[in-house]
Image (cartoon, rainbow, N blue to C red):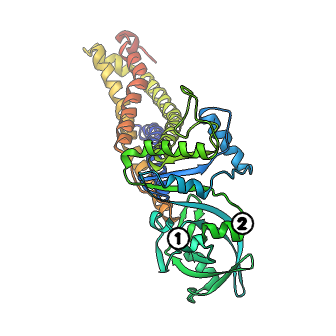
Amino acid sequence: MHANKVRTGLTVLGMVIGIASVIIVFSAGEGINNLILGEVESFGGSDTIETEIKVPSTKKGTAGEAQSGANLATGVQVTTLTLEDMEDIDKLPNIKQSYAGIMGQEQVSYGNELKKAFLFGVSASFIDMDKSEIDTGRFFTDAEDKSLAPVAVLGSKMKEKLFGDSDPLGEFVKIRQKKFRVIGILKERGAVMTLDFDDFVYVPVRTLQKRVMGIDHVLFLMHQVNDTNLLDATAEEMRAILRENHDIPPPEEGAATTIFGSGKDDFRVTSMVESMKIMETVTGAITLLLLAIVAISLVVGGVGITNIMYVIVTERTKEIGLRKAVGAKYSDIMWQFLMESILITIAGGVVGIILGVGVSLLVSLGASYYGWNWGFSVPLKSFVVSLGFSLFFGVAFGLYPARKAAKLEPVEALGHE
């Protein structure tokens, strides 16, 4: 190995690439999982249940969910979820508080400044349940919501776009030529699932419904519970209320349902705990798929080891014959060549781990630079899997050349040209 540095180095390189890929995949899987879970948690903690609209489907399970998502993506509107549903759900003993939400997009102006902005209509309890915090001023009240008060709270970026360095509190912005008084500014929050909440204009949900959009429905409801041990039972009670309100028959006894309810439902009730479990399952499946692809590069590296070891056996046939002539046993020759193969793969494994950790760190730094909650993490199992792969491929792909060398007859080997 020392005498043929270039050949040994190229053989090790094949394993380095494969093992580094294993480390990077595991680290990326952890990073993606942290990112997605962080985004989900930003909408609510483990004591939160979400109700959102869903297009009813005749299909069952994930096929029905996929069909519903596709229908919503193509513009199908569901207008059955209302504030009355939220009020009925709030009567449940385990519900602490709730808020409703709808979104729209309109031109917002102040003086000569005209900007296109997302309007986020929410209930007054939004500020108590969400991660958003008031920077200056205040959030609107439940009384202002019910009276359709034309008041607005600006995200930090929207404030900068419309007012620059001036104080916006008490000033009026125009939405569809209607004046809204600015009563508060939110602290910088950043983007969540591609939505930049700092660029939003927050208004009371009823005000947005009646004064701007002319609708009666909402897109989603968020509920906070008192006892997280009763999450599943509370979610089922909510489904029963919504089915009664929307004239949807309950699932037939013994009929297949998912955690999202039945296919006939025009709503989806999901706790944040369930959402996080689903996301963990998805990211786990992606990680396994990537590992399967990486395994191909490891096999290619292993085949390279077999080829190199086969060439080494051929070149050293006379040496093998001489050793056997002076008393070397089958096991001696076998272990000599097998250990060389294992050393190559272990060396590749160690260098690959170092390279993989380094690349993973660079990826996490790059993600952090763009404001993603990625987090640098290399799970312990990635080291175990990497070294396990190294040892396995060292034995598996070095075994045939080692056996071939050990089986050579001394006379035949010594006479080899």
Residue at coordinates 59% horizontally, 58% vertically from top-left?
Answer: 83
Residue tagged 1: 142
Q: Residues within 10 Å of mark 1 (few under 14, many from 20)?
A: few
Q: Quadrant location of residue 244? A: top right
Please, is residue 337 above or below residue 79 in the view?
A: above
Q: Is residue 254 left or right of residue 326?
A: right
| Residue placed most toward the observer, 407 or 248 | 248
Quadrant where the N terminus lies? top left
- Going from N to C along the chain, the mark reached first, 2 or 1, is 1
Residue 213 appears at what percent x and percent y? 72, 66
Q: Amino acid at mark 1?
A: Asp
Residue at coordinates 52% horizontally, 67% vertically from top-left?
Answer: 190
Residue 219 appears at what percent x and percent y? 63, 56
Q: Residues within 10 Å of mark 2 (few under 14, many from 20)?
A: some
Res 193 seen here:
yes
Q: Amino acid at mark 2?
A: Met
Residue 126 appears at what percent x and percent y? 51, 65
